[in-house]
Image (cartoon, grey):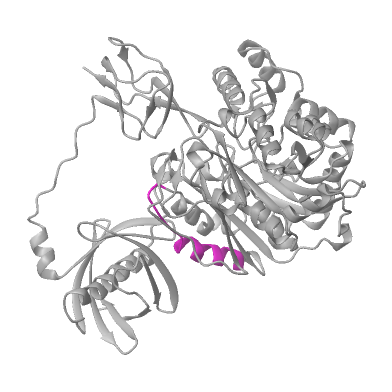
Amino acid sequence: MKKILIANRGEIASRVIRTARRMDLQTVAVYSEADKDNLFVRQADEAYLLGPAPSAQSYLNIERLLEIIDASKADAVHPGYGFLSENAEFCRALEERGIIFIGPSQESIQAMGDKIQSKRIAIQAGVRTIPGHDGVIESADHAVAVAREVGYPVMMKATAGGGGKGMRIANHDQEVREGWETCSNEGLSYFGDARILIEKFIEKPRHIEVQVFGDKHGNVVWLNERDCSIQRRNQKVIEEAPSTFVDPQMRRAMGEQAVKMAQAVGYYSAGTVEFVVGADKNFYFLEMNSRLQVEHAVTEMITGLDLVEHMIRVARGEVLSFSQKDVRIKGWAIECRIYAENPYRNFMPSTGRLVYYRPPQEGTRVRVDSGVFEGGEVSMHYDPMIAKMVTWGHNREAAIFEMEYALDEFLIRGPDHNIDLLNAIIRHPRFVAGDFTTAFIAEVFPEGFMGAQPSEDGTRAFAVAAGIILMGESALYRQIPDLMDLVVVVEQEEMYLTIERKKGCEMVAFGAEDPVVVTHNYHAGSPLASLVIHKQPCTFRIRRLAEGYLLSRGGRTVTAIARTPKHHALSRHMLRKKPPDTSRLVLSPMPGAVLKVLVGVGQTVHAGQTVCILEAMKMENTVRCECDGKRVKTILVQAGDTVEADAVLIEFE
């Protein structure tokens, strides 16, 4: 093996390139027109254009990939994850040409790529499985009949699915009918396979997976577990290793069952056996992913193994350099997936240019895997993940501590992102206590995400930060005063404080209260303010507004305006601009492609009625009407149109 083609994009392509270079191997990148300026294209030794942005015409185009393999004279292919990583046809085509596939055999991929077949194999291998129907669902009526037989609630899944695509929970007949169509459509769109299966939904479940690794000589080991229970719409958001829920006896039992599953299909390379675990600690086989997982980094952090390097070595025919007795757990690792989406607007996807992209400094305790760069584009055509950040600590408390400050220091401007949500989750008492299931996000934020729960100490910290920033920026036009009286408004709450400059610190007093000692290294114009308030380190991300600041910390983003008492008194006389009236309009909540328009001109619509379906980042999104009893005057889009966020879709009379 001398030259590896990476049949993928983004952060996994960059990761494979770095590992291959360390192993003195050449790399070939392939890219779509949307990715021509992407970071991995510049990092590779060679790069070839696949085709237009849609994945069906680029990253899923097997014929074009084979042409590039021939042209580049690559002798191996790493598929990354997603796209063709679990495509047996692609693997077979490579084997026929004598090209090394850095992954499992095409027989293993085929066996595990079909959820119905994999479940049957698991049963034969003595692996515990979820009760359900292991045949193909032929229609919506058939789906309802099966769901009634299995018993509600049920989980509906695209048989070739993964990554949360093509999955829905149904609690009654109508949800089954709707879910059958949606899961089928997403399965066909994303995986080219519209078949679905139905299983009993395990209530209060945890999603725990076991990393397995095998070689071509029959050796298979398990590399501990990862807890992936923090999810939204079946898409993983936060993962950690090990799991707080798994004891040593359970870990061994799950590991042994995972190895059984791998051995049943002659598995080699990196793979993941996923289990759903009930509150009673009974676990059931969910599926096996015959590829590297996005969350593999947490396993690497606690085992010290480079899984990508070992994938390459196994593909070359080498024997695993470690055995089961060599596998240990060192410390704790937590991974946060940073997505281009707006959690404050029901997680609507976001796209656009990364005007500002500054991850925290990496080291032994902080790792950032990313394929983006400042000035690059986040495209609507692919997965919304901007980066994944992993922190490590000697124990879970230390890993959480590192993640809190790393998230506060992560600067992204341009597309919306979910950093506030991630920060709110890892600081939440239930997460800290390890008390969560896959329903955690829905349970903790039942009315949608509105930021972390405010506290008096937190609000005061925002006020202190706003005052320190104003004092620091006053140096831009006059000498910094030794004493400032300020009124700080944080989310409509007024606070009066005095900042007195002392040697090496500031003394901040709220009214007649005892002063708080504040030290900082804030410099005027900086996008970050790192303060120590009463010995408590606090980092704030700063965005400057026409007046005041948008400050983010700990899962909250607030508007903070600091004024002198005179300016504050005068501000009461300022006129407030009224927001525009959009009651007669249906606006696109996100950038995306119009799949269907479900109303016509002259039709009367009702509140909650679905009027349009959009596709964004490979997920179907329903647009509903908020008004009631209005007639459609104009429809401004049609199926196939591409729209931006807040574009007018429909106008009422």
- The magenta region covers 398-416
Residue 138 versus residue 624 in the image, above or below: above
| Residue 326: quadrant of the picture | bottom right
* Most foreground residue, 271 or 331: 271
Q: Position of residue 282 (x, y in %)?
A: 77, 42
Residue 237 pos. (x, y %) = 56, 47
Q: Quadrant of residue 179?
A: top right
Question: Is residue 288 something that shows in the picture?
Answer: yes
Return the x and y of residue 445 as percentages of the image width and height.
46, 45
Answer with left or right where residue 100 lies relative to residue 553: right
Q: Is residue 580 above or below residue 516?
A: above
Percent x, y of residue 28: 65, 46
Q: Say if the magenta span includes residue 75.
A: no
Name above or below for residue 361 compared with residue 650: below
Identified at 84% across, 39% down, the residue is 261
Does residue 402 belong to the magenta stretch?
yes
Look at 89% across and 35% down and name the residue there. Answer: 125
- In the image, taking residue 623 as reference, residue 44 lies left or right, namely right
- Residue at the farthest bottom position: 503
Residue 313 is left or right of residue 560, and the answer is: right
Answer whether residue 514 is visible to the viewer in this image.
Answer: no
Residue at 64% over, 24% down: 192
Task: Tell which of 562 and 470 is nearer to you.
Answer: 470
- Position of the C terminus, as image quadrant, is top left
Give me the residue at 71% from left, 62% from top.
Answer: 302
Seen in the image, is 426 located left or right of residue 599? right
